[in-house]
């Protein structure tokens, strides 16, 4: 199986987001493009009409090994959402991701934020963790295990320790948007109609083979439910093991 076939297995929106992250970040890391040319500067966007800064500010990653970790989390959480919770609804995922980016931009203009990548990542992680199976666990560098639902707050705390209040404020804006996204679309459904993609976007992202082809799209890393949940699912399906009885104590 060729490399391009593996790439095509990635859902379309996740594929675009990851490709955009690489396309924006790598030239900066290789010093082919100066970062000042792609960060968000409100005056340049309004006065000089450098509209591309809005887009590139959401995909400019950090440097060094931090970029690898952030890129892995971006792929994992975006793929988790699009493959599982937005299965055969990539257009809705793209539209809601766009609305989340607009909300992040509006919240960060008063903060004078130049790069919105972290806020978007936190929003995706927040929604993905909220939609994960109850009891799902994650670990912090293999040292501490804690419920997955607390991961966004852990990342905000790390940003506070490593980057100060300014960095934490950017992450908090992503968590706020992520909570609004989860609450409005998944928890209460109050914003579900707003999150429905326009017809032109649905037509654009419709898979070539229709619903049957869309069902084959997916992959990546997914959260595995705890053992107790798997056992309950097996019991509900009528799958049972052999009843070995209560047994006896040794010597009875």
Image (tube, rainbow, N blue to C red):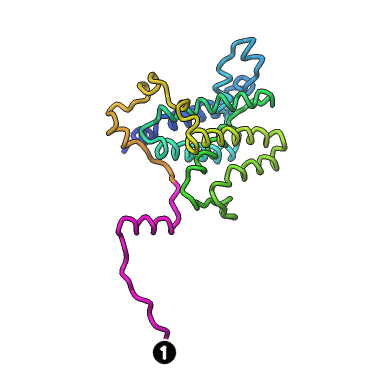
Up the image or down, 204 lies above or below 242; here it is above
* The N terminus: image quadrant: top left
Nearest the viewer among 23 and 181 is 181
Looking at the rendering, the stretch of residues picked out in magenta corresponds to 223-251
The residue lying at 48 percent from left, 50 percent from top is 134
Give the quadrant of residue 248.
bottom left
Label 1: state its secondary structure. Answer: loop
Residue 203 pos. (x, y %): 35, 21
Residue 77 pos. (x, y %): 49, 39
Residue 34 magenta-highlighted: no
Query: In the image, 241: left or right of 228?
Result: left
Residue 244 magenta-highlighted: yes
Residue 24 pos. (x, y %): 54, 26
Residue located farthest toward the right when viewing the structure as drawn: 165
Q: Pointer 1: residues within 10 angstroms few (<14), some, or many (20+)?
A: few
Kindly identify which residue carries mark 1. Answer: 251
Overall secondary structure of the magenta stretch?
loop
């Amino acid at each position: 199986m060729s490399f391009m076939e593996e790439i095509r297995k990635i859902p379309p929106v996740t594929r675009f987001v990851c490709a955009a992250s690489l396309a924006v970040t790598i030239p900066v890391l290789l010093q082919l493009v100066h970062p000042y040319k792609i960060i968000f500067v409100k005056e340049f966007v309004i006065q000089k009409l450098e509209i591309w800064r809005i887009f590139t500010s959401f995909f400019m990653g950090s440097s060094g090994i931090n970029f690898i970790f952030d890129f892995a989390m971006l792929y994992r959480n975006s793929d988790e959402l699009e493959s599982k919770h937005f299965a055969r609804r990539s257009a809705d995922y793209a539209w809601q991701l766009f609305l989340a980016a607009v909300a992040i931009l509006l919240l960060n203009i008063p903060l004078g934020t130049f790069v919105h990548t972290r806020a978007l990542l936190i929003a995706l992680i927040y929604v993905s963790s909220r939609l994960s199976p109850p009891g799902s666990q994650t670990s912090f560098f293999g040292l501490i295990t804690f419920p997955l639902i607390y991961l966004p707050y852990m990342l905000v705390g790390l940003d506070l320790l490593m980057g100060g209040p300014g960095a934490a404020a950017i992450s908090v804006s992503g968590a706020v948007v992520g909570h609004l996204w989860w609450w409005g679309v998944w928890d209460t459904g109050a914003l579900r109609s707003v999150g429905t993609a326009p017809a032109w976007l649905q037509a654009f992202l419709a898979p070539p083979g229709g619903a049957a082809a869309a069902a084959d799209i997916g992959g990546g890393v997914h959260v595995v439910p705890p053992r107790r949940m798997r056992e309950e699912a097996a019991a509900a399906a009528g799958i049972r093991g052999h009843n070995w009885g209560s047994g006896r104590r040794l010597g009875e």
